[in-house]
Amino acid sequence: MKILNFGSLNIDHVYKVPHFVMKGETLSSEDLRQYPGGKGLNQSIALAKAGMPVWHAGVIGKDGTFLLQTLESAGVKTEFLRIDEDTPTGHAIIQNDVLGDNCILLYGGTNQKITTEYVDSVLENFDSGDYLLLQNEINHLDYIITCAKKRRMKIILNPSPMNDKILNLPLQCVDLFFVNEVEAEQLIKSQVPDISVLDHKAIAAALQELFPETDFVLTLGSEGSMYLHNNTQTCQPAFKIHTIDTTAAGDTFTGFFLAGILNKRNISDSLKLASKASSITCSRQGASVSIPTWQDVMDSLEN
């Protein structure tokens, strides 16, 4: 069993602000830091730090070679990574407020330079029973999903950032979704137009009705998380912490939950593991640099 993460690689510019910038406002930031980021990179690092063998496929520019080094130092396998000499690496402008919340502006850059030939060359190294992890920060997702399904890979999708492109994908091919309440609401809005993002029980029920053959991990911030399978729901409360920065919290959750179930832990234990890992990430500054190791999480669960 192998895990392939076909995902984004970004340079994160993180601005510390008293509040998010409003329309027409000019706001001075209190601090600026640069980190390796991208949902793809973060999730690969989370998987690697959780002890899982993970291969990352994606494209960086000449300005992003340190992202390759970041992946390798975390234990991610990078032989499928490509460098585009003519396009800047994708980047993100992240506002981080005093409450630890963030808002993110993305520039795709090399993340939008995936070609079908490149996809074919990567997927030929994977087969039935292997896992494919995807987010919505690269192009040709439809082609990747279709080809992976033909190879009988298990497809896991985190549809973030959520947009209309997601609704046009062959979603019936996806085996497991990772969504927060906003992404879930947008996923079902066309079928259930009156649903409220605050009604978590209704959202969970609608997901199970509209996608009866697909499993979901539904993350709910301070309200915890849920795993939806057939007609069952498994719930996990959030750990109470002092939040410093929520960047990469969801990516950490994704990596550690997958590590849990692939290590034959049950759903309840995997949710608890992922929730604890995510809470540690929230207590630290930065994206991939804030992701804990497996031992960090085990030690924290024991205390």
Image: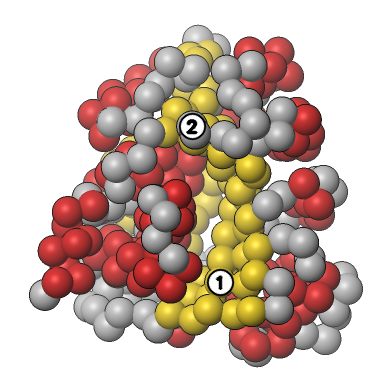
Total count of labels: 2
Quadrant for the C terminus, please. bottom left
Residue at image x 59%, y 80%? 233
Disc 1 marks a residue whose amino acid type is Tyr
Residue at image x 59%, y 24%? 126
Crowding around mark 1 (Cα neighbors within 10 Å: few <14, some 14 to 19, many 20+) is many
Front residue (pair 56, 230): 230
Q: Which residue is mark 2?
A: 2
Q: Secondary structure at mark 2?
A: loop
Front residue (pair 8, 43): 43
Q: Is residue 186 left or right of residue 96?
A: right
Disc 2 marks a residue whose amino acid type is Lys
Crowding around mark 2 (Cα neighbors within 10 Å: few <14, some 14 to 19, many 20+) is some
**How was this image coloured?**
secondary structure
Q: Is residue 73 left or right of residue 140?
A: left
Horizontal and vertical percent position of residue 95 = 40, 60
> On screen, 264 above or below 232?
above
Q: Is residue 162 left or right of residue 220?
A: right
Q: Which mark is residue 227?
A: 1
> On screen, 141 above or below 190?
above
Residue at image x 44%, y 66%? 266
